[in-house]
Image: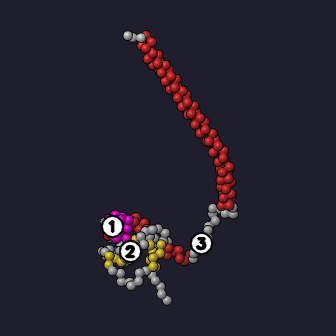
């Protein structure tokens, strides 16, 4: 019933299939490693090409930098002041900062004898608007006009509460350097 050739044929086929399958996986491994090596070599070649092509750009940038350094240092020294295009008598009005006044007053100010305005200006007492510091007069009362972030309003000098302004036209606003520091210049009509 059983033929000896039919029994061995599947075994031979199986072993030949395993041999063919083993050699094909080995071929795939070799091809994959070869492909990886080729990609690495091409990557190194591209990197070398880009570095060599950028060398001329780097040299031109260095030359431009050297030219700019010679132009910037030519004929000038660090001690020579620059000429201002503004009359000197206007600088006193521009340099009048409320923050400087607070800094000058703060070392001699006793918090137990300070007014509400002085405490708020020093940041020792919270204010309704975060970041706002009111300006005070010599007696420690609120100045009648308070300004913050390009907005000005009138206040009661004693309580600091907002009141309607008595002026019909608001004063012109001028920046003194910082965003929160605003100088007011009254309108002058001739």
Question: Mark 1 or 2 closer to N-term?
Answer: 1
Q: CA distance from mark 1 to mark 3?
A: 39 Å
User: What residue is shown with label 2?
Assistant: 146
| Residue 23 x %, y % | 52, 23
The residue sitting at 42% across, 13% down in the picture is 7
Q: Around disc 2, counting alpha carbons within 10 Å, would you say few (fewer than 14), some (14 to 19), or many (20 or more)? A: many
Of callouts 3 and 2, the N-terminal one: 3
* Residue under label 1: 127
Q: Nearer the viewer, residue 41 or 162?
A: 41
Q: Which mark is residue 84?
A: 3
Verify whether residue 121 appears in magenta: yes
Image quadrant assignment for residue 80:
bottom right
Q: Quadrant of residue 172?
A: bottom left
Q: Is residue 42 left or right of residue 152?
A: right
The residue located at (34%, 63%) in the rendering is 124
- Specify whether 53 is left or right of 177: right
Q: Earlier in the sequence, mark 1 or mark 3?
A: 3
Image spot of residue 176 (x, y percent): 48, 71
Q: Residues within 10 Å of mark 1 (few under 14, many from 20)?
A: some
- Across and down, in percent, residue 53 comes to 66, 47
Query: What quarter of the picture does the N terminus occupy?
Result: top left
Label 2 secondary element:
strand
How many residues crowd mark 3 within 10 Å: few (<14), some (14–19), many (20+)? few
Compared to residue 167, the image places residue 28 above or below, namely above
Residue 118 drawn at (x, y percent): 35, 69
Residue found at x 63% / y 39% = 45
Q: Can residue 138 be seen in this snapshot?
A: no
């Amino acid at each position: 019933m059983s033929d000896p050739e039919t029994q061995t044929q599947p075994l031979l086929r199986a072993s030949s299939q395993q041999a063919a399958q083993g050699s094909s996986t080995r071929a795939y491994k070799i091809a994959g490693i070869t492909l990886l090596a080729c990609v690495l070599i091409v990557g190194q070649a591209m990197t070398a090409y880009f570095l060599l092509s950028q060398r001329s750009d780097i040299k031109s940038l260095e030359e431009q930098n050297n030219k700019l350094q010679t132009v910037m240092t030519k004929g000038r020294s660090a001690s020579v002041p620059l000429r201002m295009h503004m009359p000197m008598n206007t600088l006193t009005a521009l340099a009048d900062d409320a923050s400087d006044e607070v800094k000058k007053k703060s070392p001699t100010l006793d918090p137990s004898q300070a007014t509400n305005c002085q405490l708020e200006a020093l940041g020792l007492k919270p204010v309704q608007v975060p970041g706002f510091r009111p300006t005070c007069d010599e007696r420690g009362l609120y100045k009648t006009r308070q300004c913050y972030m390009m907005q000005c309003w009138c206040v009661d000098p004693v309580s600091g509460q907002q009141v309607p302004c008595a002026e019909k036209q608001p004063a012109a606003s001028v920046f003194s350097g910082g965003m929160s520091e605003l100088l007011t210049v009254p309108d002058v009509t001739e």
